[in-house]
Amino acid sequence: MSAEATNPATPGPVTGPAARWRARIDLRRLGRAALLGPAARDRLPDAIGHVAEAHRAHHPDADLEPLRRAWVLAESSHRGQMRKSGEPYITHPLAVTLILAELGAETTTLTASLLHDTVEDTDVTLDQVGEEFGAEVRYIVDGVTKLEKVDYGAAAEPETFRKMLKATGSDVRVMSIKLADRLHNMRTLGVMRPEKQARIAKVTRDVLIPLAERLGVQALKTELEDLVFAILHPEEYEHTRELIVDNASRADDPLAEIADEVRGVLRDADIQAEVVIRPRHFVSVHRVARKRGQLRGADFGRLLVLVNEDADCYGVLGELHTCLTPVVSEFKDFIAVPKFNLYQSLHTAVARPDGQVAEVLIRTHQMHKVAEAGVIALGNPYAPPSAEPVDGEREDPTRPGWLSRLLDWQEAAPDPDTFWSTLREDLAQDREITVFRPDGGTLGLPDGATCVDAAYAQYGEDAHACIGARVNGRLATLSTVLRDGDTVQLLMGQDPASEPSREWLEHAHTPAARIAIQRWLSTHPVPEAPGDGLGESLHGTVDRPAEAPAGSTDTPSAADAERIRPRTTDSAPARPRTADVLVDQPGATVRLAGCCTPVPPDEVTGFAVRGGAVTVHRVECPAVARMKDAGRPEVEVRWGDTAECRVTLYAESFGRPHLLADLTEAMALEGAEIVSATVEPPSQQRVRHTYTVDLPDAALLPALMRAMRNVPGVYDVSRAQTPGA
């Protein structure tokens, strides 16, 4: 399979209407003849002119002298070297540089691109490059050189791409050159054996294409997709090619007609805009065909509307939706909420009476430049004094959040296989969300991330101690899926014995979270044990079976919870402590209601019940309103002088080791004697406790409740207020 045969830009000898289907950035029009020019192969005197012309189109005032000197050094250094395709080797760095120049790369990137193979394949040294072209070019060439010793065997891939990520993190221009390098190699892949073509195409599909997507370099990404498509799926590629050729030969073009209609609408609205037809690339046509079945004329491309100002984008949208029939479900606003790869645009679609639907992209010229070239369009991101590397590293102001996360977790990957599988999984995430911390900071996370992911993104391995979260001010489990714009407050425990749960892995979507949890679990093996609730377990005064090992992390069952006993050695039943209540019915028996357990100085009221007894309720108890509605007469009651009381408290907590021990100890220190306690089995990581306690003085109750709330993991303590509690 020749490079020309796999080039989606050359579907065949199409003339006439096919002329309108030119690629949006024609990176492929300059083949060997254009590169070599009319002169002899060993001279190439005019070849650099193509690069200079493309570079000046984006940077009219650029100084071309560094490019000329880089060309002289690269051409003389590679002279005599040949590629497997039979071309002089210099055609490769020249083609890579031309690709980047077409995308608008700045002069430093182009200079380094011309030299990117000299240190690896010739006698030129990094020191020579630095002396001749400066520290920036030396740094980039060094980064690319570290990626050049690539054996695409299965064992070499993980370490190769680990190095690639580190180099990219130091300077995104390194990856820009690497992507252009891969594109040219893919164009000329036809000289290799089919099995090697397939292996390189798979690596390109799994790693380099997602990296191009994340860096926003759509022009490279789409062509790489088409080249991989041609190699890995030749039959489907050929079928798609025939569809495109047949559509290009049609006498009518519904997309062109819709484009004329859009131009008229915008002209009448006095909006200056350029409306062009963007043909879909091969993979895009293939996807649309699989989704919609029979393709119609408008399905082979989209309309692109380019304006000067951001506000004009919304003006265009308003006119199109007013004057044409919009397909509301197709509207997306990536200007207000840009994609994680810097992409900004408005997406909509309009329908014609005959059923043809045209997708429309609306953006400014600058947005379009960034949409096509991504980080390459940002120019040189370094300004003195940060341009000088410090200790071999630098902080890249253009580094996307996803890249920072990759750099963090790739250091922690325990082995190449884990790194490789996790890298591919992470790159498969095609959308990013931003969540806010209470301090105003932000966390960038992949779509679908949970509070578990947020915890490890913010705290690293210290997130093992996370016991819960508040999302937008409300308590949430660690398994809660976050949405773009959420505010997340992570609740951290203080217990040094805190540990992650195996069940957290089910809710961890980021590599950083999964690797940290897996590493802890692998170094702390525990026997299988029943449990629930994302694995945080309770330890306290629970009567465990004799065979339970010390330090077991089992969560207590309901039966275990019922065996919790007061911390007392007295086998006799404790004497109930009840506050003195005075009632206006002589001889009546007074009972404190169990539904609200009133204590001094609560405002109370009473109701007569069968047997001549009077039950005393807090006035805000729900039972009071029901009895009043039923016509039950109230009995006046008031507190006497005795301050002893019995009260029922509810505690809500996240599960964690030793929670019961800490909680009951805090209660004992406040003078509370536990009469009974019930701990319900955890549900969605939350645990509900019910304690009935005797206090020597009702005035101690507020302090007791504060002490219970201060126990790490406890997020709420309340008095009993429901009937039947």
Image: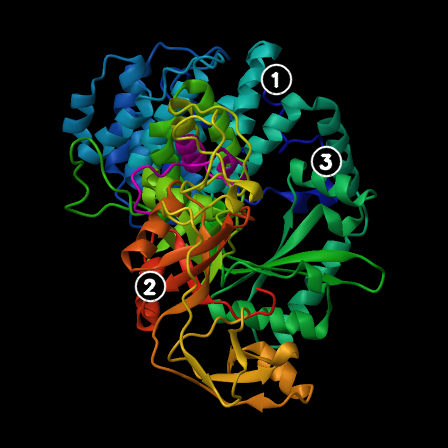
Q: Is residue 513 magenta?
A: yes
Q: Which mark is residue 14?
A: 3
Between tags 2 and 1, which lies in front? 2
Q: Is residue 343 visible?
A: no
Q: Residue at x 74, y 28 (%)?
A: 236
- Residue, disc 2: 704
Q: Is residue 65 visible?
A: yes
Q: Is residue 576 left or right of residue 682?
A: left
Residue 154 or residue 104, whichever sits in front? 154
Q: Residues within 10 Å of mark 3 (few under 14, many from 20)?
A: few
Q: Is residue 342 magenta?
A: no
- Provide the secondary structure element on which disc 3 rests: loop
Is 549 drawn above or below residue 474 in the view shown? above
Is 82 drawn above or below residue 133 in the view shown? above
Q: Which mark is residue 269?
A: none
Q: Amino acid at mark 1?
A: Ser
Chain-order first, disc 2 or disc 1:
1
- Residue, disc 1: 2
Residue 466: x and y in percent read 38, 46
- Asked if the residue at tag 1 contacts the one at tag 3, i.e. Cβ–Cβ closer than 8 Å, the answer is no
Q: Residues within 10 Å of mark 2 (few under 14, many from 20)?
A: many
> In whole angstroms, how far apart are the C-alphas of marks 3 and 1?
20 Å
Residue 691: x and y in percent read 46, 57
Magenta region, residue range? 492-517
